[in-house]
């Protein structure tokens, strides 16, 4: 099995829509919602985190060009899931109960 196949089969613990907190980098301590998960590169796109400026040219005649701020992907190891019960950044575990597989908070053991 080659490396690309292994990456695609990897199960991500952080999903789209989760609230995460940044634990390292220039935006350390900030929180935001995950907009997209990039499994091939182990990165996540978080709303309002690691913003970069992009110069956008005018599309139509009479319209002005502008500078737009866009979020840049951040490595998944630099973010922690923000538990609603604990109120802190926590690691995520898995528990299997019957036919259902669910994510749990490693700190308070509650289902996410």
Image (cartoon, rainbow, N blue to C red):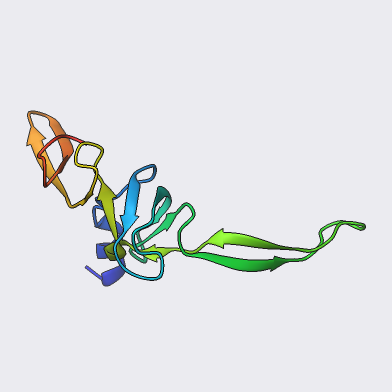
Quarter holding the C terminus is top left
Q: Residue at x 84, y 60 (%)?
A: 64
64 relative to 26, above or below: above
Between 97 and 48, which is closer to the camera in this rendering? 48
- How many labels sit on residues? 0
Q: Residue at x 91, y 58 (%)?
A: 61
Q: Is residue 112 left or right of residue 42?
A: left
Residue 25 image point, x, y percent: 36, 70
85 relative to 37, above or below: above
Residue 72 image point, x, y percent: 49, 64
Specify the quadrant of the image occupied by residue 39. bottom left
61 relative to 15, above or below: below
Q: Is residue 78 left or right of residue 62?
A: left
Specify the quadrant of the image occupied by residue 8. bottom left
Q: Residue at x 33, y 50 (%)?
A: 20
List the single residue furthest toward the right.
62
Quarter holding the N terminus is bottom left
Residue 63 image point, x, y percent: 86, 57
Between 21 and 10, which is closer to the camera in this rendering? 21
């Amino acid at each position: 099995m080659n490396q690309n196949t292994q990456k695609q089969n990897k199960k991500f613990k952080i999903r789209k829509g989760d609230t995460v907190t940044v634990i390292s980098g220039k935006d350390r301590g900030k929180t935001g919602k995950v907009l997209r998960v990039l499994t091939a590169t182990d990165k996540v796109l978080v709303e309002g985190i690691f913003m970069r400026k992009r110069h956008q040219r005018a599309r139509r005649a009479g319209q002005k060009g502008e500078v737009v701020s866009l979020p840049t992907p951040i490595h998944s190891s630099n973010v922690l899931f923000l538990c609603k019960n604990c109120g802190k950044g926590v690691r995520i575990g898995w528990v299997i109960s019957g036919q259902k597989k669910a994510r749990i908070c490693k700190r308070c053991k509650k289902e996410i």
